[in-house]
Amino acid sequence: MNAVASSSGSGQATLARATGHARARTARTPASRYVLHAILIVLSVLYLLPFFWMISTSLKPDGQEIAMPPQWIPNPAVWDNYVRSMTASPMLWYLRNTLIVTLTATFFGVLTASLAGYAFARLRFPGRNILFSLCLATLMLPGIVTLIPEFLLFRFIGWNNTFLPLIVPWSLGGHALGIFLFRQYALTIPRDFDEAARVDGAGALRIWWTIIVPLSGPVIATMAILAFIHHWNDFLRPLVFLQDRDLRTLAIGLRLFRGEFLVQWNLLMAASTLMLLPVLALFFAAQRYFVQGIVMSGLKG
């Protein structure tokens, strides 16, 4: 009886302490939550301020975009700026060029990165770890360092002033980050699937296509979004490799709104807004898969 009473007393004490801690947490939670929400709201406003300025400027009449003090709400709102931005320069042609480069490089980049990631994750071959380490080491190499050697190489083989320097390097293994993402994700897929497929006579390529690819939706979406944004917004490489006006992409086409003595800010911001819409649409459409792919491939903080 004494033991039962002692145990009961100890249990009540533990329950009391737990209740006290819970009450303390409940008492602290609202204040900390308000502070956290306030910080997030301030940071959100700071991050959204340039975007709001871009939208506001795109609707301002000529001359009002550089007025001091700044007028945040355009009066009147000139929606015709969006039409003028598309007709003042061959932006639709530049859109065609951008789509050719972006979609082709994204498709083949994701395809080859998936193959390389699968090989590093599931196949056994000599030097696999060394090759993967060298692949990851290229992430430390700034892209600007290889720009001049690439230019000389592509000029030697006659690829300059074509879309090939923008597409082919990404189509031969994609990017080291993509290979890393696919490898990490493939490691999370049980090997029992491979062994069951091998019993049925499947080879490595068939296992990749029938098992790994269908199960890799999140990482495919993640890699596709990252590659699409990279190629869609790329300015430096098209500027270096494309000299013909008919081969310009949208990122280069935006420079046409900057003259020697005048910048058409309202038209430039209108074209920039239109250029941003496909990226936003793609991100929000695949946001769930993007977050899932980042988490399951081991890149979360």
Image (cartoon, rainbow, N blue to C red):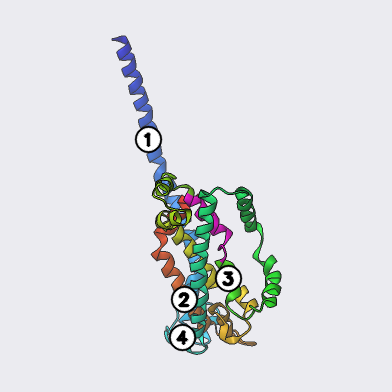
Q: Which dot, 1 or 2, sits closer to the camera?
A: 2
* Residue that carries the numbered disc 2 in the rendered image: 55
Q: Is residue 102 magenta?
A: no
Q: Which dot, 1 or 3, sits closer to the camera?
A: 3
Label 1, label 2: how far apart the Cα atoms are: 47 Å
* Residue that carries the numbered disc 3 in the rendered image: 168
Q: Residue furthest front?
A: 201
Does label 4 or label 2 sit earlier along the sequence? 2
Q: Quadrant of the N terminus?
A: top left
Q: Which mark is residue 22?
A: 1
Q: Quick check: can you spot residue 300?
A: no
In percent of width and height, residue 232 lies at 52, 72
What amino acid is at disc 2? Ile
* Residue that carries the numbered disc 4 in the rendered image: 81
Residue, x 40% and y 36% (percent of image)?
24
Q: Residues within 10 Å of mark 2 (few under 14, many from 20)?
A: some
